Image (cartoon, rainbow, N blue to C red):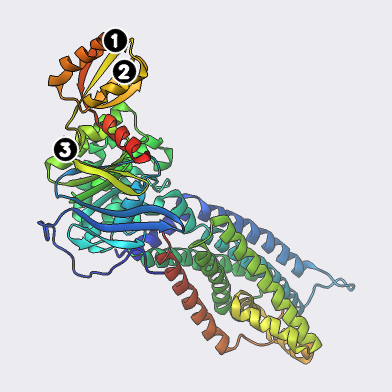
Amino acid sequence: MTDVAEKTEEEASPRGEASGTPAVKTVELTKRFGRTVALAGLSMTVPRGEVFGFLGPNGAGKTTAVKLLLGLLTPTSGEGWLLGRPVGDLQTRRRIGYLPELFRYQGWLTAAEVLSLHCELAPLPRSSWKDEVRTALETVGLTDRAHDRVGTFSKGMQQRLGLGAALLGEPELVFLDEPTSALDPVGRHDVREIIRGLAARGTAVFLNSHLLSEVEQVCDRVAVVDHGRVIASGTMDELLGGTSVRLRVAGLTQADKNALSGFGRIDDEGDQLTFAGLDPDRVPELVASIVAKGGRVFEVAPRHETLEDRFLQLLQDEEK
Amino acid sequence: MPPVLVIARLTVQEASRRRLLLALLILTLIVVGFSAWGFNKITTVTRSDGTTLPHDQVALITSQLLIVVTFMFSGVLALSAAVVAGPLISSEVESGLLLSMLARPVRRSEVVIGKWLGLAVLVAVYAAGSALLELIAVDWATGYLPPHPIELTVFVAAEGLVLLSLGLVLSTRLSGITAGVIALVAWLMGWIAGVVGDIGTGLQNQALQNVGIVSHLLLPSDGLWRGAIYAMEPDTYLAALRAAGTFGRANPFAAVDPPPIQFLVWVLIWFALLLGLSVWSFRTREI
């Protein structure tokens, strides 16, 4: 068995070293737990300064990927680099922030003490701790609870604290694993604003989430993972290029509906038909065809494809 | 501050904030108070002619009672060390507490050694503090002091460190409850194996004696306890034990000789081995 976490690199890498290199790069990164394949040949590149959404259903391998990248797990095969350095490099971790999915902090410490502890472990210059802690508490809205013990915090407040810890020292790359799982709508909004703030100052964000609307609002680029494999990736524009049209119709037989498949992939929900990837210019032609087959059209609603539409379609395609 | 010392400080801080130190201090003061009262009673015992016991007899009885009381203290220390060390790593892995810390530039070896160091400080402080209080109380009550109080403290502390080290290595792979229970059972089995060795000495049975020797090598806690006993025995009692021959050696609360130097060297090696094993085990654990 090999060491999990530590590839010693004694010399500190100066901030911005190899800034031409991607924030994250993996080549055929694979992880098996016994006979279970948690991650199957993950190859991807996350450019610097981008907000990258890593999407997938529960158990798809998202958290495994993050743990592999942070050196908490050993890959079965494949390679990975963070900020131009091999995964597991201790000094690279000075420039990385991480909010785990399973967030938990020392309940016997106060919020300010937890953040000071992470300043010390980061390690940041002692003279900067006070400002770093104050800024982090302000950013995540915990200034009023700075001197309360973490053990008295709600889950949402602990997640905010974890987010604050991940932001200490202006990291160049931040991993956020389901960062809003315990937050209320206001908290989710705040997290989106924090992510936008990170992107504005050039920090790369690796956002693990299955909350698609959240990802859609903040991410520049996404990868969809299922059963340990990336099944789609690209910029939001590349993934969400199509338009869908939803119609409320009556009087069509199944054969009639099948005959309409030339207009696009049909999501048939009885009297609701949704045509994915349909050119808006062809909508009149579609309506005419339905009427010609004896159908009656009550409503036509063109709409841009959402990430949720695309995500569900990808998963359905995978199952076929 | 280096990460290893940060982790050690955090371990001490946790014990303090969770009021473990306060609980031990209060319990220790209660025990010391009761034992001082009990020891004082020895000096007031009267013989058939109405006189009190001479100083030599008071010293002899006190030395024997002190061994029993110290056995209780060393037991508390060993049990506490095992119970605290058992979940030291595993509970923080299971809760996720270590995830964000290990994503910092912190080596896993620093986490393991830091936790060992923090708990070792607590064990040493408790051993020294409780020994000091108890010996002051006994001295006040009877005017008796054991011949080697420093060695006594060191051996009792080292016994606690053995249980701490065993609990820690188990904690890198097993759940806190499992690790703690195994450490406790191992400690009791080690003590019983020592008694078996004593019986072997009394019966001059080499096979039984070997049980004691092997158990002392596998888990040196009982061997160290014998060192603590030896440090508490006055010369007159030692002379009586030696005069009794093999039967003088067949007593789990008596030690005719100090622990051999080879054994003490082995104890140091044992600590290094277990700490090294703990580091290796945690470094190769996936969390």
Q: Is residue B245 left or right of residue A261?
A: right
Mark 1 neighbour density, 10 Å: few (under 14) some (14–19) many (20 or more)? some
Disc 1 secondary structure class: loop
Q: Which callout, 3 or 2, points to the residue nearer the camera?
A: 2
Q: Is residue B15 left or right of residue A142?
A: right
* Residue at 29% across, 30% down: A308
Q: Are marks 3 and 1 on the same chain?
A: yes
Q: Is residue B190 left or right of residue B177?
A: right
Q: Which residue is mark 3?
A: A238
Q: In the depicted view, which residue is nearer to us: B273 or A178?
A: A178
Q: Quadrant of residue B231?
A: bottom right
Q: Which residue is mark 1?
A: A295
Mark 3 neighbour density, 10 Å: few (under 14) some (14–19) many (20 or more)? few
Q: In the depicted view, which residue is nearer to us: A36 or A191?
A: A36
Q: Amino acid at mark 3?
A: Glu
Q: Which residue is mark 2?
A: A256
Residue B252 seen from this side = no
User: How far, Cα to Cα, is label 2 from label 1?
Assistant: 9 Å
Q: In the depicted view, which residue is nearer to us: A5 or B29?
A: A5
Q: Residue furthest left?
A: A20
Disc 3 secondary structure class: helix
